[in-house]
Image: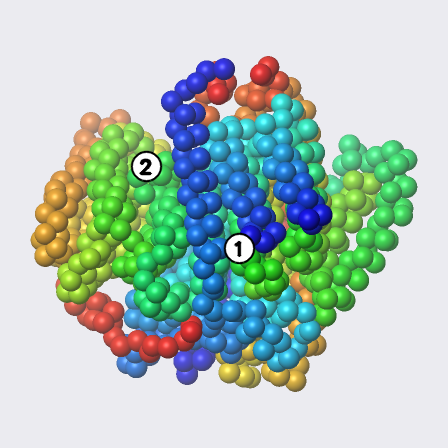
């Protein structure tokens, strides 16, 4: 059973990429719906298997690490696989209605979309450092292709900038891998973690870890390396922006977090941990402030991503040298933040796409009067905003509550400032959109009405993000499952 | 001893062509330097006893990338001198 | 020349990076690696179906990397042709009258095709393999194109897309079949390992060449707008 | 010190040169070439460091082959994007305002 689920999980996105490449947009859409269903069922099945029996290593090609590549199928990985299935299916569904089938280049949306999904799954499950590099490149290149789709000058500019940043980030990561391989002779993360635990810290490896952290932070758009993100996420088509903000930036962060949790104790340092946290905290405040100032709706949402990504980097100071309990709280808080931000930000971008489609302009002022015509999408936008602000009972609230406890538990009270100020500032930019859309003296009285299904999708995502706070316990329980040790000598 | 001499000269040549690639005044010459760099890299791989990579580097690194960049350099240089004037700017 | 603070920062940053990296390499070079992977590879070489260790690593031990890597190549090809707005590949500008190029093409192209064939065949027991052969094949295609040979199959149509994906699709099918027939995704059945690897390599050569050629062809931009196939003017 | 290690240090230098070029050069094709130089540097470190005892190691060699293919894919895609961008905007850099060449 597990064998079938794993094969299905790895095979479906790649196979669907090939299938949809051979079709035009309309046929590709129908085939994609089928693929989403398969992928959702397989992800759900795997989640249930892991929830029931615990995690395991999966040796590809039957070759054990370090010779072969082993996948690490644990609670966290399958949670993210399931999250990806949910969000990607929602974005794909939205795209299948949102994108114009008459434009010939939109046929290439589907294969790129499926390759992106395949890359994400490869990263969540990856347990081999070089394989993670290839997975990252799979994600980056398909994401760049999606941003550039359509080929207008501004989109190309954003895509080139994105591509260059992503390539530099991957190269820094790969250089770290080269050093680690030179030192330990292995590429399996589990094996390397065991080796460093035995031999203790090593300056060469510590430098490698720093290089990898730099590369991954660049790909995650951590302040001050964030400048490629707003143009790319702002200019892409809304379903693409949703995918990029909700999932793609999380992939590189996920690798950074995995490396940190496995190797950070031996190879990290207090300065590195605090430095990452400081940059994250600055990102929260700077990103929120910039979001507040943006004249364009999608730029507001994109800068909000820069801010929300900042919270994730609090993982580093909150787990370094902390007690088991505090570290666990921080990890749980970050996991919830990843999930709730993914759901909320996807909802926000999709709703923003609907609003832009409705008023025919991407400027915030142009939203005047939209509250009368499109209350449903505006409401989804607001609900997602509630989660970003961290108000109860949203997932964002549960996440920040855990982070708050971890900050107090480890005696690092200064992160409270970030948590509180970030919430207030995000309230600022969400209410700014609301105020603009409730302005009554609008001279436009004609609004285009997007199909109802386009409005339903962001609503579902926003409600999930809101409800996550109530189900936080059960979502997090799978993380604490036993994991089959061994593998990766 | 002679081995060290060969390796040392090769490394020196690689670094020189690398610098020449980035800071040649003319884009076209830079690309030619890049191709030369690729061929020297292929030699370096032979010295590192990695003939597979040497073949790939010669075919892909020097050959295809070179042609791709040459074609692009010709195109980007054809409509006037670009707008940033990186090439035609006096030093 | 103006010395901006940015330049100073970049110089200092790059020097610090280089020095740190050199120190790390120097430090690591002084320590023996705890795991010797080459020995493990040699131990399992007999079971890999090929005699050349690099090919064994690429197409058997770490075949998942290779599968995803071909995926990366296909993505680049897709993104590239999604930008292409070429009318016909018989671009008059490209039809050269250069007699040197003509002679080169006359003699070189068959030679290069033979070289590609040799590299592919050699891959199982000595240096060579799908990547090198595919690159040489693509290079001969580039030459043919520079010589003005039309090569209609490179138009962004169904045929091109099949060509792009063929090697990848077959690789994927083998992976899936091995998952259902055997023990794991990508675990080839013992008896068929060598023929399977050879089949995959042959088709990969073809597809790698197609992707690289498609990217070369879609790079030039011209004004012409032409509806793709399946669309009416 | 073996000759493999010499190449590893050459790779270190290439990484430094490439990084500096990548940051400072503004012409997109030059940036792309700087990226490729840096990539070659990383590959040299990977193989040179792993083979410091002098014996060839097929694993990093295979990784570098994979890396070269990924690099050409990225380079070729970047060239397509850059050429189309130039065609549409007439620019060869990402600068906001195409005046005032500094450096």
Disc ID at residue D49: 1
| SS of the residue under disc 2 | loop
Q: Can you give x and y, in whole percent of width and height, for residue C223 in the image?
A: 65, 32
Vertical placement of C45 versus C145: above or below? below
Which chain letter matches label 2?
A
Q: Can you give x and y, in whole percent of width and height, for residue B81 in the image?
A: 63, 20
Vertical placement of A375 versus C222: above or below? below
Placement of the N terminus of chain A among the 4 image quadrants:
bottom left
Q: Residues within 10 Å of mark 2 (few under 14, many from 20)?
A: some
- Residue nearest the observer in this picture, A257 or C148: A257
| Residue furthest front in the image | B1
Placement of the C terminus of chain A among the 4 image quadrants:
bottom left
Q: Residue at x 20, y 48 (%)?
A: A388
Lateral position of residue C213 relative to residue B82, left or right: right
Which chain letter matches label 1?
D
- Residue nearest the observer in this picture, B63 or A135: B63
| SS of the residue under disc 1 | helix
């Amino acid at each position: 059973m597990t064998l079938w689920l794993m094969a299905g999980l790895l095979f479906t996105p790649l196979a669907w990429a090939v299938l949809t490449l051979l079709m035009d947009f309309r046929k590709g859409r129908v085939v994609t719906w089928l693929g989403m269903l398969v992928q959702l069922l397989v992800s759900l099945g795997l989640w249930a298997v892991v929830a029931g029996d615990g995690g395991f290593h999966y040796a590809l090609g039957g070759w054990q690490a370090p010779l072969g590549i082993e996948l690490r199928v644990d609670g966290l990985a399958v949670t993210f696989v399931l999250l990806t299935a949910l969000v990607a299916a929602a974005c794909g569904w939205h795209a299948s209605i949102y994108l114009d089938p008459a434009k010939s280049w939109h046929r290439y949306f589907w294969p790129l979309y499926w390759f992106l999904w395949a890359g994400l799954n490869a990263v969540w499950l990856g347990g081999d450092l070089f394989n993670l590099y290839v997975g990252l490149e799979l994600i980056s290149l398909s994401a760049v292709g999606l941003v550039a789709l359509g080929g207008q000058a501004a989109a190309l500019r954003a895509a080139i900038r994105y591509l260059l940043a992503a390539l530099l980030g991957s190269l820094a990561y790969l250089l770290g891998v080269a050093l680690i391989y030179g030192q330990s002779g292995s590429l399996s993360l589990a094996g390397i973690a065991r080796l460093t635990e035995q031999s203790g810290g090593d300056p060469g490896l510590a430098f490698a870890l720093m290089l990898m952290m730099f590369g991954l932070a660049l790909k995650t758009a951590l302040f001050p390396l964030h400048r490629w993100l707003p143009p790319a996420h702002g200019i892409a088509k809304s379903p693409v922006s949703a995918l990029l903000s909700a999932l793609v930036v999380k992939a590189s962060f996920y690798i950074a977090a995995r490396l940190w949790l496995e190797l950070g104790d031996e190879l990290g340092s207090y300065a590195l941990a605090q430095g990452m946290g400081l940059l994250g905290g600055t990102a929260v405040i700077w990103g929120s402030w910039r979001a507040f100032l943006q004249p364009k709706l999608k730029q507001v949402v994109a800068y909000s991503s820069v801010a929300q990504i900042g919270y994730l980097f609090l993982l580093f100071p909150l787990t370094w040298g902390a007690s088991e309990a505090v570290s666990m709280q921080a990890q749980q808080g970050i996991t919830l933040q990843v999930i709730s931000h993914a759901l909320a930000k996807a909802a926000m971008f999709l709703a923003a796409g609907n609003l832009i489609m409705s008023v025919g302009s991407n400027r915030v002022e142009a939203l005047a009067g939209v509250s009368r015509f499109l209350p449903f999408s505006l409401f989804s936008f607001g609900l997602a905003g509630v989660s970003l602000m961290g108000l109860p009972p949203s997932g964002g609230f549960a996440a920040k509550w855990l982070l708050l406890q971890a900050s107090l538990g480890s005696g690092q009270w200064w992160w409270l400032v970030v948590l509180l100020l970030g919430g207030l500032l995000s309230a600022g930019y969400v209410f700014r959109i609301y105020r603009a859309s409730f302005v009554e003296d609008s001279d436009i009285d004609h609004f285009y009405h997007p199909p109802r299904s386009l409005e339903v999708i962001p609503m579902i995502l926003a409600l999930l993000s809101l409800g996550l706070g109530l189900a936080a316990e059960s979502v997090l329980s799978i993380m604490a499952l036993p994991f089959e040790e061994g593998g990766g000598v | 001893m002679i081995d060290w001499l060969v390796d040392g000269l090769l490394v020196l040549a690689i670094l020189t062509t690398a610098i020449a690639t980035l800071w040649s005044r003319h884009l076209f010459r830079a690309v030619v330097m890049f191709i030369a760099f690729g061929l020297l890299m292929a030699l370096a791989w032979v010295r590192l006893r990695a003939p597979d990579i040497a073949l790939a580097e010669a075919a892909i690194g020097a050959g295809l990338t070179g042609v791709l960049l040459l074609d692009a350099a010709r195109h980007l240089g054809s409509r006037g001198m670009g707008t940033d004037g990186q090439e035609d700017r006096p030093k | 020349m103006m010395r901006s603070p940015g330049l100073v920062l970049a110089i200092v940053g790059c020097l610090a990076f280089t020095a740190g990296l050199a120190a790390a390499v120097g430090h690591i070079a002084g320590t023996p690696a705890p795991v010797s992977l080459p020995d493990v590879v040699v131990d399992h070489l007999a079971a890999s179906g090929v005699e050349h260790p690099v090919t064994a690593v690429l197409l058997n031990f770490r075949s998942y990397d290779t599968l995803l890597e071909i995926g990366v190549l296909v993505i680049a090809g897709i993104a590239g042709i999604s930008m292409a707005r070429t009318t016909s590949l018989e671009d008059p500008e490209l039809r050269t009258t250069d007699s040197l190029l003509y002679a080169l093409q006359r003699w070189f192209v068959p030679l290069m095709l033979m070289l590609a064939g040799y590299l592919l065949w050699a891959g199982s027991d000595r240096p060579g393999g799908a990547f090198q052969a595919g690159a040489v094949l693509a290079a001969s295609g580039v030459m043919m194109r520079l010589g003005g040979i039309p090569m209609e199959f490179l138009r962004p149509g169904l045929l091109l897309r099949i060509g792009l994906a063929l090697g990848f699709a077959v690789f994927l099918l083998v992976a899936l079949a091995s998952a259902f027939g055997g023990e794991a995704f990508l675990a080839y059945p013992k008896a068929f390992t060598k023929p399977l690897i050879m089949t995959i390599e042959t088709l990969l050569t073809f597809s790698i060449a197609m992707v690289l050629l498609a990217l070369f062809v879609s790079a030039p931009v011209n004004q012409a707008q032409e509806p793709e196939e399946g669309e009416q003017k | 010190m073996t000759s493999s290690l010499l190449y590893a240090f050459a790779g270190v230098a290439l990484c430094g040169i490439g990084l500096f070029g990548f940051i400072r050069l503004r012409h997109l094709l030059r940036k792309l070439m700087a990226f490729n130089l840096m990539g070659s540097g990383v590959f040299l470190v990977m193989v040179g460091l792993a083979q410091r005892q002098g014996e060839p190691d097929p694993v990093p060699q295979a990784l570098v082959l994979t890396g070269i293919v990924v690099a050409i894919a990225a380079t070729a895609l970047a060239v397509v994007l850059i050429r189309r961008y130039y065609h549409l905007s007439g620019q060869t850099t990402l600068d906001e305002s195409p005046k005032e060449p500094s450096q």
